[in-house]
Image (cartoon, rainbow, N blue to C red):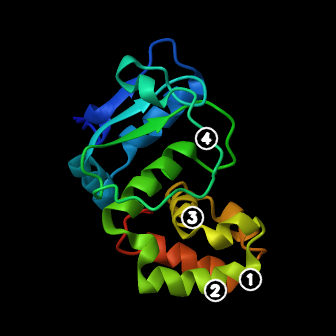
Amino acid sequence: MIVQTRGALEPLLHLEPGHSAELAGAAAALAELSGRAARRLAGALDGIWLGETALPGLAALVHLCAADTVPRPRPPVDLAPAAGRRIVIGSGPHVSGSLAHHAAGHALCGLDRAHLSPEWARIMRRCAPVFRLPHYAAAAEEWWAESYALVATGAAHRLFTLLSYDDAVARLVWNYHAGDRGAAE
């Protein structure tokens, strides 16, 4: 007998009607997320909204429409780690290995402020000289989210490429996320 179970994040998903195949895939990827990462997100988030364009134009999120999606330095604010947080995923252009997992990575990082930990600071010092995309060197939270997404989706080659084919550094990042953080469960 086959028993189908719902993923921990499935009840939180709000997919805009008339969505694209890209967004359906993102929703499915998040619905299938399991393990510690999924449980942490399910307990911390109010919902995950997916819609067309850069940010969905859903009624409850009108204030986010036309918001800038280009990575830029943000003013320091306390987001009350994941209290009342929402993940919003659009279909605009992106460079992430997986936009859905990247957004989940940001939420997970925010829960523990993991990008501020001494362990992540050590990893960033090892990564900085080999980044293929230099903006990651000054954006610890952004690299945390992207590297989480790459590990969660099994994109070892892309991680290896972004770290200038430095095997030791790529393994360091992979092992960090695949360990107790649950990215590769």
Of the image marks 4 and 2, the number of the one nearer the N terminus: 4
* Picture coordinates of residue 103, whole percent (x, y): 48, 48
Please give left or right for residue 123 compared with residue 1 in the image: right
Within-10-Å neighbours for mark 1: few <14, some 14–19, many 20+: few
Residue position marked by numbered label 1 in the rendering: 129
Q: What mark, if any, has residue 126 been given in the picture?
A: 2
From this view, report whether residue 141 is shown above or below residue 102. Answer: below
Please give left or right for residue 133 compared with residue 145 in the image: right
Q: Residue at x 44, y 33 (%)?
A: 27
Mark 4 and mark 2 in contact? Answer it, CB < 8 Å: no
Residue position marked by numbered label 4 in the rendering: 69
Amino acid at circle 4: Thr
Within-10-Å neighbours for mark 4: few <14, some 14–19, many 20+: few
Indicate which label's residue lies in the foreground, 1 or 4: 4
Mark 4 and mark 3 in contact? Answer it, CB < 8 Å: no
Query: Judging from the image, what secondary structure is the residue with disc 3 in?
Result: helix
Of the image marks 1 and 4, the number of the one nearer the N terminus: 4
Query: Judging from the image, what secondary structure is the residue with disc 2 in?
Result: helix
Q: What mark, if any, has residue 147 been given in the picture?
A: 3
Q: CA distance from mark 3 to mark 1?
A: 16 Å
